[in-house]
Amino acid sequence: MKCSRCGGRAEIKLRQHNASFCRDCFVPFLQRQVERSIEKHDMFTRDEEVLVAVSGGKDSFALWDILISLGYKTTGLHLSLGIGGYSDRSTEKAVAFAETRGLRMITLSLRDEGLAVDDATEFTKRPACSACGTLKRYYFDKLAYERGFPVVATGHNLDDEAARLLGNVLHWQMEYLGRQHPVLQPSHEKFVRKVKPLFRCGEYESAAYCFFRKIDYIIEECPNSVGATQLHHKKVLNQIEAVSPGSKLAFVQEFLDKAQPLLRDKAIEPPGTCASCGMPSHAEVCARCRLLREVESKRLARADRLRLQAIAAAELEPVGVAEPAISAASTSDQRDVDHT
Ligand code: SF4
Ligand SMILES: [Zn+2]
Ligand SMILES: [Zn+2]
């Protein structure tokens, strides 16, 4: 297999592009693909400081590395989600990536904010991914706004976008379809632009990019991803892709070219302002503040229950338990008297 660019020995075949590459040609090829997406969709310019959401996984590292290589100004943002040891290991990878390259990165721990993803699953009936999505969106928006970044870039790739599109089409979610685009313009003064520069790059490409660039990323999957609907959709799309290469890219790109413009006016109304935290919200209180209130009230209720149980257990304790101490004291007193 020969490299389509230089004729040398190819190490990767991209069936959707009907091309093969050696590693020296693949790296600039992918970087150029991303640059074209950024330029075609006016995602950001080289004068703007981009806040890059970095999870510790291959997609966000590939994105950050590509943006730096292309000469964009970036700062990383890592949210430690509070999903058991998985989050600690992800944070270690993100911190190591930034430190070894001398990059700026903001790190925020959801546990320190009083609402980790594990708390949401422990105290509420919300599925982990739904709570996690709410919290990620909230803190990306909040930090970008408070620190003055004009744009947030996330590592969503072609597989993510195709699976999301399939999910939205299966249920004809017109509002979501109206908002599914690689560039989301702010609809509130406290929102900033959100962009997905990797939306045309598959998971396979970002993994190969990290491998060729020797980027150490977290390989284990989030424990909450087991059984997630999006994974089923990805599986189905991979089966289609195997028999018809290029289907995923065509599915997403043609939706964006042909259908999405017709659905833009179906997108939900602009948000108001959360009465509790002041961030944008479609309800009186935003989804994150509602989640926080629910977790806090259930945490208090549990603490009260445990306190009552402890009191009840103490009351039931047999009186005789204290006796040895009393008799020992009396004996000792007696002895003291004797000794004097
Ligand atoms: S799989 Fe779900 S819980 Fe885990 S990081 Fe992704 S969205 Fe969050
Ligand atoms: Zn080559
Ligand atoms: Zn709020």
Image: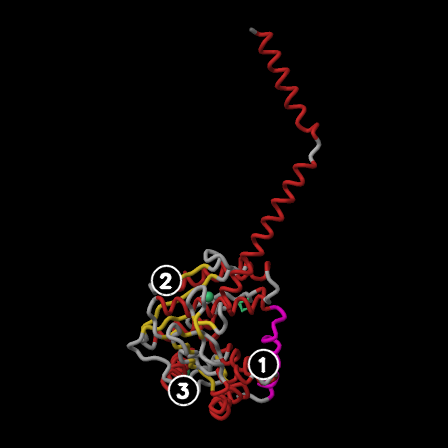
Disc 2 residue: CB within 8 Å of ligand 1? no
The answer to whether mark 3 is within 8 Å of ligand 2 is yes
Instruction: Judge the density around disc 3: few (<14), some (14-19), many (≥20) Cα neighbours within 10 Å.
Output: some
Q: Nearer the viewer, mark 2 or mark 3?
A: 2
Quadrant position of residue 53: bottom left
Indicate the amino acid at tag 2. Answer: Thr
Answer with the quarter of the image where residue 164 lies.
bottom right
Residue at which label 2 appears: 100
| Res 17 visible | no
Percent x, y of residue 54 = 43, 68
Range of magenta residues: 226-243
Measuring from the top left, give residue 44's x and y in whole percent.
Answer: 34, 79
Distance between mark 2 and mark 1 Cα atoms? 39 Å
Q: Which residue is mark 3?
A: 5
- x, y (%) of residue 174? 54, 85
- Relative to the observer, which residue lies in front, 255 or 184? 184
Dot 2 or dot 3, earlier in sequence: 3
In front: mark 2 or mark 1? 1
Residue at the spot x=67%, y=24% of the render?
323
Image label count: 3
Residue 155: image tag: none
Q: Which mark is residue 167?
A: 1
| In-image side of 115 versus 327 (left or right) | left
Q: Residue 317: percent from the left, percent from the top?
A: 69, 34
Residue flagged by tag 1: what amino acid is it? Gly
The answer for how far apart the CA atoms under marks 3 and 1 are is 37 Å
Q: Residue at x 51, y 91 (%)?
A: 259
